[in-house]
Structures are given as C-alpha cells and as structure tokens.
Image: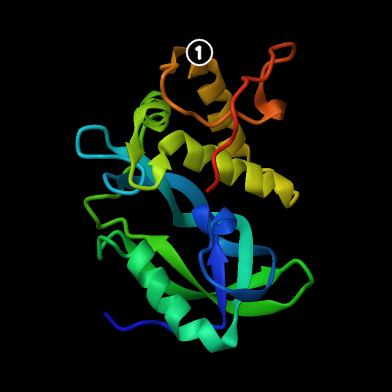
C-alpha cells in the first residue's frame, strides 16, 4: 500500500494519549465531515476472538475534535511507517486520508488520519447494551477495552473537549461497573461521570 506523507497527524482515539512517535507540537484540532464512533470490531489490540472488543473510528458525517501532532522532521518517515503498522494491522479496517483540520490557534493544516472503512467486515455499529458489554469484558494485546474508552474520554476532557457520546458511554459503564470481576485490574472511571454521592473505586489507572 502506498504511504501518504504528512507533516501533521490527527488523533481521535488512543493516539491522543499514546501517540508513540516524536512530535514538536500538538494542540486541539477540529475536523469537519466525520464523527468519532465505536465502530471497529477488535480481536487483537482490545479484544480477542472469544471476547471481541470495539475501538474508535472516524465515521461519515458531523465534526470531531481531537489532537493534531506535528511530526518531528528527522523521524517523520519512520513515524508514518510505524503508524501504518499500528493502525493498518488488518489492511482493510481503516482508510488512510490526508484531511484539512483547523487547529485551536486558527491555522488549517493537512494531517494524516485513519477513517473507518464501512466496506470492511470489521465495521460495526452496535446497540448500546452490546457496546457496553464489550467494553467491560474484552481485553487484548494492548490491554482492557474499558481502559481504552476511559483514557480517551479523560484525554479529551483534559483538553477541554466534551464528547457527549463518550460521556454517555462512561455513564453506562459506571452503571454496570459493580458487576466487574474484582480479580482483574480495571481502570477507575472519571469522577465527573459517577452518580452523585458514590465513592471513587480504589483503583489506579494503568499507563497507556
């Protein structure tokens, strides 16, 4: 597959809190024409064949805020190669695109991002109960599915971005969290999505 080159990368999921590449600048950015959705079936990074998980993709319509990273020039080619290996583990799941994003400081830059491929067998739009179930029970090579969801939500909030869909998912996870097995390490849910008066779980958030 031909690799798209770009000075910037637009992250909307785990790239925001675990980019794994050197960069000289990063800031909040907005992309029009797509929205963030749990629409990618995961049986490797955040799930397994027996217990599939679900991760985020950019789906058509709306707009989305994420983080734009300006790649360090000396390692730019290596960074893009690594991104393709990470995001295109299954070649047809995402479609690499160079898109125009508006940075928080007003600049518009061209950035590499990875859009959900609706023609892929891994594309899915799950009902809420199945989405929550997968997030709670699935775990893959990169860790528990719930950790992925919580870290993404927390990173957006840290940058002043409120994602209504993710907030609703967090509330749903918290309602079901008491049913989690107590013998596995899980990520504590952010305080602001817990019902009033309910104490925070005494758990530590593992590194991304």
Helix, strand or loop under label 1:
helix
Crowd class of label 1 (few under 14; some 14 to 19; many from 20; radius 10 Å): few
Q: Residue 14 at what x, y percent from top left? A: 51, 53
Q: Residue 165 at what x, y percent from top left? A: 57, 38
Query: Which residue does the image show at 41% across and 82% down from the upper left?
Result: 4
Identify the residue at the far bottom of this view. 74
Horizontal side of 114 relative to 27 (left or right) equals left
Query: Which residue does the image show at 62% across and 19% down from the upper left?
Result: 201
Horizontal side of 46 relative to 8 (left or right) equals left
Horizontal side of 83 relative to 158 (left or right) equals left
Identify the residue at the far right of this view. 105
Please name whichever residue, 162 or 86, is drawn nearer the observer in this view of the structure: 86
State whether residue 190 is above or below residue 39.
above
Please name whichever residue, 128 or 151, is drawn nearer the observer in this view of the structure: 151
Query: Which residue does the image show at 54% across and 57% down from the upper left?
Result: 18
Residue position for label 1: 178
Q: Residue 23 at what x, y percent from top left? A: 61, 74
State whether residue 112 is above or below residue 170.
below
Q: Residue 172 at what x, y percent from top left? A: 53, 23
Q: Quadrant of residue 91?
A: bottom left
* Quadrant into which the N terminus falls: bottom left
Query: Which residue does the image show at 64% across and 42% down from the upper left?
Result: 154
Q: Quadrant of residue 168?
A: top right
State whether residue 49 is above or below residue 117.
above
Please name whichever residue, 185 or 87, is drawn nearer the observer in this view of the structure: 185
Q: Quadrant of residue 17?
A: bottom right
- The scheme the figure's colours follow is rainbow
């Amino acid at each position: 597959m031909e690799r798209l080159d770009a000075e910037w990368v637009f992250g909307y999921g785990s790239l925001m809190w675990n980019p794994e590449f050197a960069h000289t600048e990063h800031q909040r950015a907005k992309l029009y024409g797509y929205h963030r959705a749990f629409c990618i079936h995961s049986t490797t990074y955040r799930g397994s064949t027996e217990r599939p998980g679900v991760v985020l993709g950019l789906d058509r319509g709306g707009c989305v805020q994420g983080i734009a990273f300006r790649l360090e020039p000396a390692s730019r080619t290596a960074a893009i190669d690594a991104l393709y290996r990470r995001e295109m583990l299954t070649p047809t799941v995402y479609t690499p695109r160079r898109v125009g994003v508006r940075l928080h400081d007003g600049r518009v830059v061209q950035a590499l991002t990875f859009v959900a491929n609706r023609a892929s067998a891994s594309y899915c739009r799950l009902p809420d109960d199945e989405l929550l179930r997968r997030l709670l029970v699935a775990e893959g090579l990169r860790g528990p599915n719930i950790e992925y969801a919580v870290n993404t939500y927390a990173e957006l909030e840290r940058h002043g971005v409120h994602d209504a869909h993710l907030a609703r998912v967090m509330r749903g996870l918290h309602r079901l969290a008491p049913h989690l097995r107590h013998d596995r390490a899980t990520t504590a849910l952010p305080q602001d999505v817990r019902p009033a008066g309910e104490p925070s779980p005494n758990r530590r958030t593992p590194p991304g």
